Amino acid sequence: MAASRLDLNDNAKKTSIGVLQACLTDSIDLYNATRQAHWNVKGPNFHALHTMFETFYDTLAEDIDELAERLVQLGGTATGTSQAVAGATRLAPYPTELRQGMDHVHALAERYLALGKSLRDGIDTTDEAGDADTADILTGVSKNIDKAVWMLEATAEG
């Protein structure tokens, strides 16, 4: 852990760095899966899904940056290379053979739900460790993920 003069104890910093790195890794993987869906979606709802997926990955890009910057503020090293993400993601591999819109909707929904759960677990863990600021950042990202889940579920229902 690099030096950080933030007034959090070392345990809080280490705990938050671990949670942030795990959520960062999963978020990068989800970003890539969402891009995969965006590029390859086909079917009658192509335009609407293509546009929705773009909105999702744009939001994820901002959230990824916030997670990584907080991790570094605490003295960690944000790791987001393709190799590191592939080796550490907790998300199921995204099926690259998908083409039909609703197949992408269902596959993304499962992964967004998984990240949402990890974020909520991270909120509790970092809050209990005494790092309310990291818990707040995770809450913001969680809200964005929950909104995407809502949109995916509403689309799947139609």
Image (cartoon, rainbow, N blue to C red):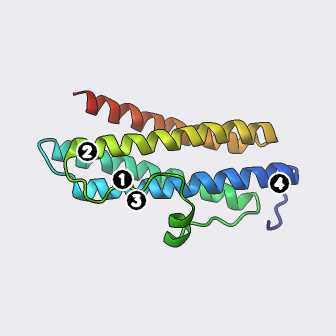
Disc 4, disc 1: CB below 8 Å?
Answer: no
Disc 2, disc 3: CB below 8 Å?
Answer: no
Whichever of callouts 4 and 1 sits on the residue coming sooner in the sequence is 4
Disc 3, disc 1: CB below 8 Å?
Answer: yes
* Cα distance in 3D space between marks 3 and 1: 5 Å
* Cα distance in 3D space between marks 4 and 2: 45 Å
Mark 1 residue type: Thr
Disc 3, disc 4: CB below 8 Å?
Answer: no
Q: Say above or below: 10 vs 48.
A: below
Looking at the rendered structure, the secondary structure element under dot 3 is: helix
Closer to the camera, 41 or 13?
41
Q: Which residue is mark 2?
A: 103
Query: Callout 3: 10 Å neighbours few (<14), some, many (20+)?
Result: some
- For residue 102, side relative to residue 59 (left or right): left
Whichever of callouts 1 and 2 sits on the residue coming sooner in the sequence is 1
Disc nearest the viewer among 2 and 3? 2
Q: Which residue is mark 1?
A: 34
Whichever of callouts 4 and 2 sits on the residue coming sooner in the sequence is 4
Q: Which residue is mark 3?
A: 32
Disc nearest the viewer among 4 and 2? 2
In the picture, the quarter occupied by the C terminus is top left
